[in-house]
Image: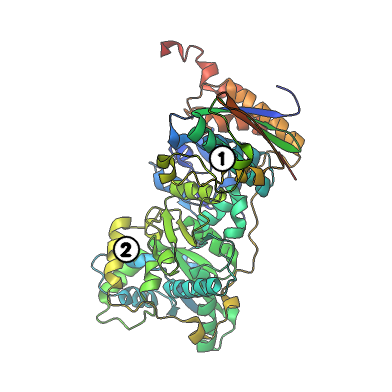
Amino acid sequence: MERKFVTLDADKCKGCITCMKRCPTEAIRVRGGKAKIIYERCIACGECIRCCPYHAKKPVYDPFEMIHAFKYKVALPPPTIYGQFNNLTDINYVLDGLLRIGFDDIYETARGGELLSQATRRLIADGKAVKKPIIGTKCPAVVELILLKFHNLKDNMLNLLAPAEISAKLAREKAVADTGLKPEEIGVFYITSCPAKVHSLSLSGFVDGVISFSEVYFKLINEMPKIAEPRELSKAGLTGLSWAVSGGEAAAIFGNICFAVDGLENVMEILKEIEDDKLMQTDFVELNACSGGCVGGVLNIENPYIAKAKINALKKYTPISKNDMDALGKPIEFFCNEKAYEVNEVMKLDDDRARAMSKLMQISEIYKHLAHLDCGICGAPSCKAFSEDVVLRGQELSTCIKFRLPDLHQNDG
Amino acid sequence: MSQDCIRLEFKVDSENFASAGSASESVKTQLKLLGIGSSDVRRVAIAMYEGEINMVIHADGGKATVEIYHDRVEIILADRGPGIADIALAMKEGYSTAPEDIRALGFGAGMGLPNMKKNSDEMRIESKLGIGTTIYMTVRLT
């Protein structure tokens, strides 16, 4: 699959520099009056979708209708969506609703979350875990960020599957056992509002499609009021539901020093600390690209703080966990991520070190002559990025405002 | 600028303790752009970070010069601080003369110089009491 996570509605884009300035990996340029994404650098965090004042950016989803191509359809709802409804008193309304809008079964990813928590604890107890501090890998935008900019931390990344992937594997197994159909006749669909998850799950091969939560939401709010008494469908406990909120994953490690960080800027600061060996005493770090964790996801309907409060209310009186890998008969290998993480070398100036050095010298030389305003008028997010564009991508030096307004700094006093 | 190396200079400012470590951060960014292997980047960053912190704690700051060659990184950290009375003693793990308030911040564990030695391939210290200290480090790139 190509690395294309976000699309642009060119008619709506005004060529303003809002998304370009906010992109955490400097993956956006404005060219010809329109925002242009450098996909090789994009980590699918969705920040540009969140901040665009004209709603010109959209994540790429699979269409809901594609579920009908399968004989038996299973929905994977993440716990985040339970926080998106008004006056929801019981998770089962959402799950029963999913069965009414076209799915034959559901498998909550909160269950995968609970199993992943247990698998992580077991890996640590058996001394088989990766280098400390262990970095949780449930947030695909963070995974992409590490592979793009923090190559040194590859060996700290937890080598287990994400909750949705574990749930997808188990959902398909269950559907085969329940129906007698072949695995390929079963459609497993993840429901999300997160562009990073769309990408990572589509690539994972565990699901047949990734559907937009907002599309499902409008179908659900029509069906849910018709349910008099929902069936008892939920099989997730407090641990699984907590995965929707920053801190839930870290808390379930039951380790000595485990903590959660959310918001990409904060995540980058912590990654720098880990890179410099400053967190050697820490056992586990949970990282969330979005503020507040997955409830802060870019296209969620509810405000993240309210969604968190709603999920907390739904968590009340649920058991700590309802899922157990031993009861399921699954060994630790079932949860392991068999694909090795591969670093993304796109930030490197050149494969040849001498040529890279010469490019870096040219970049520094050009940078010296710029206005250092980081104004973005040239269409690059910073003067540093502009210097790189001139040397590496043939950008015209004359597009810098300093060369167009020679008296730019004359009023500086 | 000579053709075979990239030379970077930083003023290590003691006024702003919170900014200590920013020179090492900047070098790290440049080395990553060059595609230097991540373990080498890490060694340079740690050696330099420790040196920077030392200059801020003991010498009211100083100057850091970094030269990136195709096969090595040379780091020169020069200060006009009090100088080191006994270099062999200063190199011992756990030995520190950092003041109490600095220790309260979690520094001064006596691991600065040993960590610099551990993360560089060559290290030389020139120090004169009352005049200052200059540390030369070489990190070879693989």
Chain under label 1? B
Which numbered mark, 1 or 2, is in the foreground of this view?
1
Chain under label 2? A
* Residue B69 visible in rendering: yes
Up-down: is A15 above or below A132? above
In the rendered view, does A150 fall on the left or right side of A225?
Answer: right
Cα distance between the residues tagged 1 and 2: 45 Å
> In x, y percent, where is residue A321?
39, 78
Q: Which three-letter amino acid code belongs to the residue tagged 1?
A: Tyr
Residue beneath the point at 53% across and 88% down = A177
Q: Residues within 10 Å of mark 1 (few under 14, many from 20)?
A: many
Which mark is on residue A84? 2
Up-down: is A324 above or below B75? below
> In x, y percent, where is residue B77?
61, 31
Q: Which three-letter amino acid code belongs to the residue tagged 2?
A: Gln
Residue beneath the point at 55% across and 72% down = A123
Give yes or no for contact between labels 1 and 2 (Cβ–Cβ under 8 Å).
no
Which mark is on residue B36? none
Up-down: is B3 above or below B57? above
- Residue topped by disc 1: B49
* Residue A55 visible in rendering: no
In the rendered view, does A350 fall on the left or right side of A288?
Answer: right
- Where residue A78 sits, quadrant-wise, is bottom left
Helix, strand or loop for disc 2: helix
> In x, y percent, where is residue A44?
51, 52
Q: Which of the pair A125/A226 is nearer the observer? A: A125
**Where does the C terminus of chain A fall, quadrant-wise?**
top left
Q: Which of the pair A400/B98 is nearer the observer? A: B98
- Both labels 1 and 2 in a single chain: no
**Where does the N terminus of chain A fall, quadrant-wise?**
bottom right
Up-down: is B124 above or below B3? below
> In x, y percent, where is residue B132?
58, 26
